[in-house]
Amino acid sequence: MNLTLHVWRQKSRTDEGRMETYLAKNISPDMSFLEMLDVVNEDLIKHNKEPIAFDHDCREGICGSCGLMINGVAHGPEKATTACQLHMRHFEDGAHIYIEPWRAAAFPVIRDLIVDRSAFDRIIQAGGYISVNTGGAPDGNAIPIPKENAETAMDAAACIGCGACVAACPNASAMLFLSAKVTHLANLPQGQPERVQRVKKMVEQHDREGFGHCTNIYECEAACPKEIPATTITQLNRDYLLAITAGGGPGARKGGAG
């Protein structure tokens, strides 16, 4: 396969950035998208040119590092697939492919296709944990959990924090990410002691980071490589409303949580 790549190049946060064109020659259809970029970078290095900077780690669809907008779609054209697990056989020979970083004010570009997603870390630090002394590992059946709750928690816990929901949302909202983390703990007994304070703190941090509000576009659900359902946002809204009511909070957020 021979492809024409239109890649966003940006030296730093202060650089204006621009699209540059590269040829990707003799690409195997069995290569992953990131392996194709490796081949292009090897050719650039061979010709003493600056390679394209992009994030990657596990390359197994687990870590969420490989966030790319591919032809305007977060992670590319295949549903429930991360960029690192996307194979080149899904593209036509001779195709033009446009590759850009996530576009959101809360995800500033560091270099080329790499963005700073530390805003997600700060949201987790605000309340996405439980503060208990666990001691020794308890028996798996020591705490009975209803099957529906366990399945809802596990589905939400599948979120890998890649940020595709933010990149896909026209409001650059991180509500799907946030609601997945809240729903995960809200459906487990271990998450109950801090449930009220958790959702308030995490929603407030979400807003401080500059993410937008949810207006029920559902692009987040469509773009999520782990197929986190938008119903988790319903859980977030419910918990947040109860939290500000029970805790005497500042009142409903402008635009609501969902």
Image (cartoon, grey):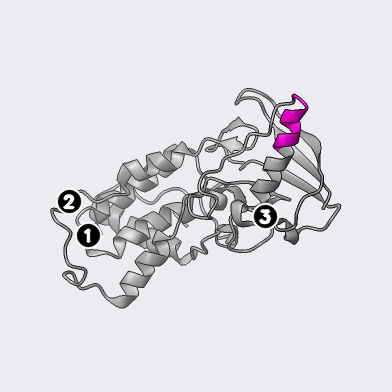
**Label ID, residue 190:** 1
Comes first in the chain, label 3 or label 1: 3
Residue 25 or residue 7, whichever sits in front = 25
Q: Residues within 10 Å of mark 2 (few under 14, many from 20)?
A: few
The alpha-carbon separation of the residues under discs 3 and 1 comes to 37 Å
Residue 5 in the image: x percent, y percent? Answer: 78, 43
Work out whether 207 lies above or below 130.
above
Residue 133 in the image: x percent, y percent? Answer: 14, 50
Work out whether 79 lies above or below 38.
below
Q: Are marks 2 and 3 in contact (CB under 8 Å)?
A: no
**Label ID, residue 132:** 2
Q: Say whether residue 241 is visible.
A: no
Which residues make up the magenta segment?
41-48
Q: Say whether residue 177 is visible.
A: yes
SS assignment at label 3: loop
**Label ID, residue 76:** 3
Q: Is residue 42 magenta?
A: yes
Q: Are marks 1 and 2 in contact (CB under 8 Å)?
A: yes
Residue 225 in the image: x percent, y percent? Answer: 55, 59
> Which residue type carries mark 2?
Val
The alpha-carbon separation of the residues under discs 1 and 2 comes to 8 Å
Q: Main secondary structure of the magenta part?
A: helix
SS assignment at label 2: loop
